[in-house]
Amino acid sequence: MHRWFNNPEATKTLMEERESFSIEQARGWTGAAVRNEGEDRKYAIVVPGIEQPVGFTALYGLFRQTAPELGCLIGDEVRGRGVGRWAERLTVTKAFEEFRAHRIYGRIPAFNAAAKKVVTAQGWQYEGTMPGHIKRGGKLIDCEIWGASPEQFFAAVAKW
Ligand SMILES: CC(C)(COP(=O)(O)OP(=O)(O)OC[C@H]1O[C@@H](n2cnc3c(N)ncnc32)[C@H](O)[C@@H]1OP(=O)(O)O)[C@@H](O)C(=O)NCCC(=O)NCCS
């Protein structure tokens, strides 16, 4: 966690970049993640042949009237090799099958082409733009909203 959140190549496309992330913060983050309590769930991404996890996925805001949000960070240098696609597929399947979510959604910085490509291949639809929602380094960046129903998701991934 400490390694991933301190990797600018990985965090530059996130909704928010942290100014810093200490080892204590990483311990707190992982300690909370493994407790599996509350309305969020986080999963380490493990790739066969690579000793340490390469990133994580998350479901934020489960068990509510509003749909949960998907998060994903491939923190190590294996981006662009299909890992995110599979990690997101497995995580969204859990959201629908294990947690019975009625929908899934995500906020994606408009410039994050890889994130949009991954969800498009999984039946997600572009639903709108929050103009200038992200302010970073004095620049305003659009934030796109994407989402899918269980029907849209399962129909799309069945074709893989
Ligand atoms: C976004 C992310 C989860 C995608 O996972 P990944 O393992 O890198 O993606 P995959 O290899 O499964 O697929 C990426 C697709 O986007 C394409 N892609 C990658 N970078 C791209 C770019 N800059 N522009 C256009 N397409 C791009 C790849 O070619 C691939 O498409 P293909 O299947 O047609 O070849 C991952 O890159 C990541 O964690 N990035 C940093 C954090 C982040 O941005 N998280 C999402 C926040 S909304």
Image (cartoon, helix red, strand yellow):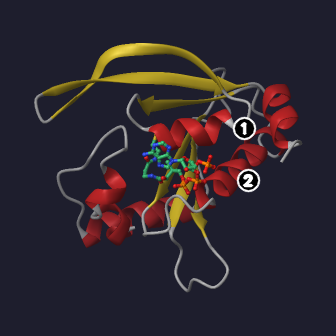
* Residue at 30% in and 64% down: 7
Query: Which numbered circle lies on residue 23?
Result: none
Mark 1 touching mark 2, by CB under 8 A?
no
Mark 1 surroundings within 10 Å by alpha-carbon count, few (fewer than 14), some (14 through 19), many (20 or more)? many
Label 2 crowd (10 A; few <14 / some 14-19 / many >=20): few
The mark nearer the N terminus, 1 or 2, is 2
Residue 107 pos. (x, y %): 47, 29
In this rendered view, identify the residue nearer to me: 50 or 117: 117
* Residue 97 point in image, percent of width and height: 84, 43
* Residue 39 appears in the rendering: no
* Mark 1, secondary structure of its residue: loop
Residue at image mark 2? 90
Q: Amino acid at mark 1?
A: Gln
Report x, y in % for residue 36.
61, 57
**Residue for badge 1:** 122
Q: Is residue 104 above or below residue 26?
A: above
Quadrant the N terminus occupies: bottom left
Amino acid type for the residue under numbered disc 2:
Leu
Residue 42 pos. (x, y %): 57, 55
Identify the residue at image location x=78%, y=46%. Answer: 93
Mark 1 vs mark 2, foreground winner is 1
Secondary structure under tag 2 reads helix
